[in-house]
Amino acid sequence: MATTSIFVSSVQKELAEERRAVKAFVEGDALLRRFFTAFLFEDLPAADRRADEVYLEEVGRCAIYVGLFGNDYGYEDKDGVSPTEREFDRATERGKPRFVFVKGADDKARHPKMEALVGKAGAQLIRRRFSGVSELTGALYASLVEHLERTGWLRTKPFDAAACPGASLEDLATEKLDLFLSRAQSQRGYPLGPGTPVETALAHLNLLDARQPSHAAMLLFGRQPQRFLLTSEVKCMHFHGLEVRKPIPSYHIYKGTVFELVDQALDFVMSKIDRRVGTRALGPQAPVEYELPPEAVAEAIVNAVTHRDYASNASVQVMLFSDRLEIWNPGELPSVLTLDELRRPHASIPRNPLIAEPMFLAKYSEKAGSGILEMIARCREAGLSAPEFRQSGGQFIQTLGRAPSEATPEVTPEVTPEVTPEVRLVRVLVGEMTRQQLQRALGLRDDEHFRKAYLQPALDAGLIEMTISDRPRSSRQKYRLTAQGDKKGRT
């Protein structure tokens, strides 16, 4: 959540101490300062503008109005109305949450117009009376915490299970949900399939909170998840050296659902690492091996996206250096797991179980806590050192060492700093292959991403062709290289 501004009712000499106390209290409290800043009119620098224009503009800009009403009515404009009443009326017109605090146990000493304003406020909302600063700050704290709970920013439920504030079922993409259900059904035998009503599908996955989509629902199937969860994006960077240096040669910020983030980040890494092209002794298509096992890279990225702390203001970062791949994600290991235990068989303890479950159903991950062990095994099979894991500054960091560049007699290293998706597809296509076989060879899980980013561009470019061209949707459809594609695959 971005910090919300609170407008504290305009300058009144009578309540100067209380106004300053409110600002100091809000910005000094460990909880409130995470969510709020307090605006005082007198903190604005001098400007060539009318004061009434400025304070009314600030009321419109701020998210919450806090009215402090004393005995004095204050300065009156040509219509006989004070700034305090103008501000209250503007907050009312704009539908702002209004918290009104009245000083004094009774109205005996109150100016008639201020007494009338207190009465007007009382007819619209619940007022709180206070006698001193400590009573005022205590009442304000209770009001702000209640506001945070009501709007969903302060939760008693886990993050992934809690309703996503401001989101509705219309913010979910039914086509993304149907693609997931199709995959989950084919890969894991999930009982629900495409066409299942949205509410039914979400309820089955425990992704509704009082009929409102949860944070997990938005991250999994949202049309624009980053509209509600800005830092859920993934930042990918490629450096030619051993450390972070500017300018960054290649820098991409990816947005989308958690499935799309994984596939896009994996594409970024695989398109920039070295690949080794073997001989054609065993067939017409030369085998291609990447210096980092695609399965290990995918596992590391899935871990970061699935198990990150989504309440953090930081994003997942994927950084490729000349000697290593580092993947940083906000959050630390569960307290019952240590870094050493990650390298041994261990239980699966997901930070976000309602995100982890659909990732498992779509076969992006396994439940058994074996993902890290599989990553280690894949790297060792490729002749690489075991991945390293560490925690630093609230971040969990996975490091995969890159392969040495020496060539063997049978293998020629070929550096490809930028390889388009359709060229990657051409280089893994051997003979005739189905869509599922091509996706497995590329290490991709998301069907729609594969179709849009790989398959269709390769078809449009004339690099591949269908084996059953007159029935594009045939269940027996396969793909093969064209002459142009074969030539492209050799370069």
Image (cartoon, rainbow, N blue to C red):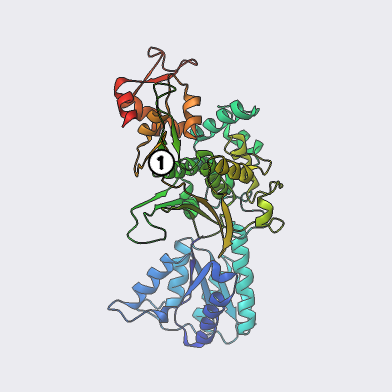
Q: Is residue 266 above or below residue 461?
A: below
Return the residue nearer the eye: 400 or 369.
Answer: 400
**Residue 156, horizontal then vertical, whole percent:** 67, 57
Which residue is at the front of the view, 31 or 262? 262
Q: Residue furthest left?
A: 48
Q: Which residue is drawn at 41% across and 58% down?
A: 242
Q: In this view, does 422 lie to the left or right of 397?
A: left
Depicted 143 relative to depicted 351: above or below: below
Q: In which quarter of the image is residue 94?
A: bottom left
Residue 57, how many percent across, how many down?
38, 69
> Relative to the observer, which residue lies in front, 320 or 14?
320
Left or right of 319 in this view: 208: right
Which residue sits furthest front?
409
Picture coordinates of residue 303 (x, y %)? 57, 47
Q: In which quarter of the image is the C terminus?
A: top left
Residue beneath the point at 58% across and 66% down: 125
Q: Which amino acid does label 1 sit on?
A: Ala
Residue 473 to residue 98: above or below: above
Q: Is residue 424 left or right of residue 440?
A: left
Q: Name the residue under label 1.
A: 407
Relative to the observer, which residue lies in front, 185 or 440? 440
Relative horizontal placement of residue 51, taking residue 143 as reference (left or right): left
Q: Position of residue 438 (x, y in %)?
A: 46, 27
Q: What element carries label 1?
A: loop
